[in-house]
Amino acid sequence: MSKRTATELQATSSSEAKKPFGAPSKKVEDDGMGEFEDAWEDEIESDEEVAEGQKDDEMEVDEEVLPPIEETEEQPAAPNVFIPGVHELGKDEVLEADESVYIMRHSMNVNWPCLSFDVLRDSLGDERQRFPATSYIVTGTQADAAKNNEITVYKMSSLHKTQRNEDDSDDENEDDEDALDEDPIVEFRSIPHLGGVNRVRAQPMPRSVPLPPVSQPYYVASWSETGKVHIWDVRPLMEALDVPGYTIPQSRTHTPAFTVNSHGRAEGFAMDWASSGDANPSALRLLTGDVHAKIYLTTTTPSGFNALSTPFTSHTSSVEDLQWSPSEATIFASCSADQSVQIWDVRTKGRRSVAGIDSAHESDVNVISWNRSTSYLLLSGGDEGGIKVWDLRNVKKRGTEAPNPTPVAAFNWHRGPITSIEWHPTEDSIFAASGADDQVTLWDLAVEQDDEESGAMDATEGGKDVPPQLLFVHQGQKDIKEVHWHPQIPGAVISTALDGFNVFKTISV
């Protein structure tokens, strides 16, 4: 079975051909007696002596003479890189990852597809660079029957660095104790969930705030296909994974802490948490949007959750995604199958959007992401496969005649609907995206075209332009649904698809 490499896409300039190392010229000196003496006479034989020695040797040994090394401008053959949209796998071909471009790469299979997940903040510290790594995630299943579904917390530990190929010449990775040929350890704890889980989102935990004590809940919301949004406390599940012999209190986990019934029987996918900047559960707010174009707000008070009964209504079709502003406590954004992106203020009477981008995409707007560092930048991904970056300072207010803004950047690399998009948690120019074309792509808006390398990047052999901002293409999964950066392990990415999870970190980010 032949194999093709799925690897990093980046410009590489041709290195100069190596030239043979020249021998030093002979040096002669005047010894003061009127005669010249070779300074190397004792070390190097004369031409005549060499010639005579060669004749004697030829009489005794028939020695093969190698041809001289000649200069060449030919470059080594390029690797057989598979480029999506340009190449197609043959009947007997499979993709094989190029391990030299990964710092870490692991995969995990699951019993039932998990089409949504979120990364759980842990107490192991921020900015973790050492290996092996450990990660906690929460997810929900799409089982064969409604009663067989679960909310599951996974602990993935012993995530070692990737072993290099034998022919890898990277000396830095030789004898690397962190790159062990060992499988990760996967442990999990589950609770029952009625109905397939459309989306899961965990309570936000600010980076500057320590993880709350065990006695304080860690809330996760799940959008069920039954039309209900359940809020669960998953802290006992995390404790059961860390503390031997810990008994999970069913009264705290098997029954939701709260259920949002505002949507009736309408199914939904859009959901996002907001907080006041600390880990106090009484400061949480949860937005949920359904297929009937309605958005509801659920707030928390010291006495518990409170689902508001009046919806936000400006969309004319299914609400696909929601994002709270990272800098304005009362502002949020939404996107819809009506092709628009709307901006809202929860204080506005009438529950109508205050600004928006009509026809933001040519088709449904599936996902959005609000930049946490540069709060006027918003990403959107469409059903047509396009990715756009918007400057919200240019978005028109409702009631004005201003034209639609133009995106500050637009990319059409993906050949299928964009299923997930997310800014890097700390780098304001980097984002990740996933698509129904089985790709996870990493981008950096700060990268500019290098004129000297433009020939290498302008087009592939199939004529498809490779944007210089495209850092990396990760492949190998089928029907990818979501991708998230790990907020505590810089550069680590987790993705989920029909066949399970991938956890990886590349040399590009």
Image: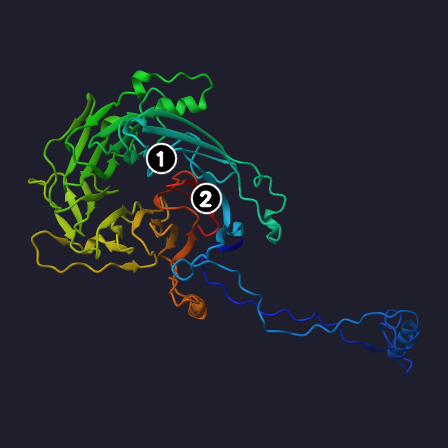
Q: Which amino acid does label 2 sit on?
A: Phe
Q: Name the residue under label 2.
A: 504
Where residue 217 sits: x, y (%)? Answer: 31, 23
User: Where 179 falls versus 144 (above or below)?
Assistant: below
User: Where 89 falls versus 47 (above or below)?
Assistant: above
Mark 2 and mark 1: span between their CA atoms? 25 Å
Residue at figure coordinates x 19%, y 48% from the top left: 337
On screen, residue 25 versus residue 76, left or right, reads right
> Residue 200's image quarter?
top left
Residue at figure coordinates x 42%, y 29% from the top left: 123
Furthest toward the bottom, the residue is 34
Camera-side residue of 179 and 293: 293
Where residue 198 sits: x, y (%)? Answer: 27, 37
The answer to whether one can see residue 213 in this image is no
User: Where 309 falls versus 415 (above or below)?
Assistant: above
Q: Mark 1 points at which residue?
A: 208
Q: Nearer the viewer, mark 2 or mark 1?
A: 2
Where residue 503 sits: x, y (%)? Answer: 44, 41
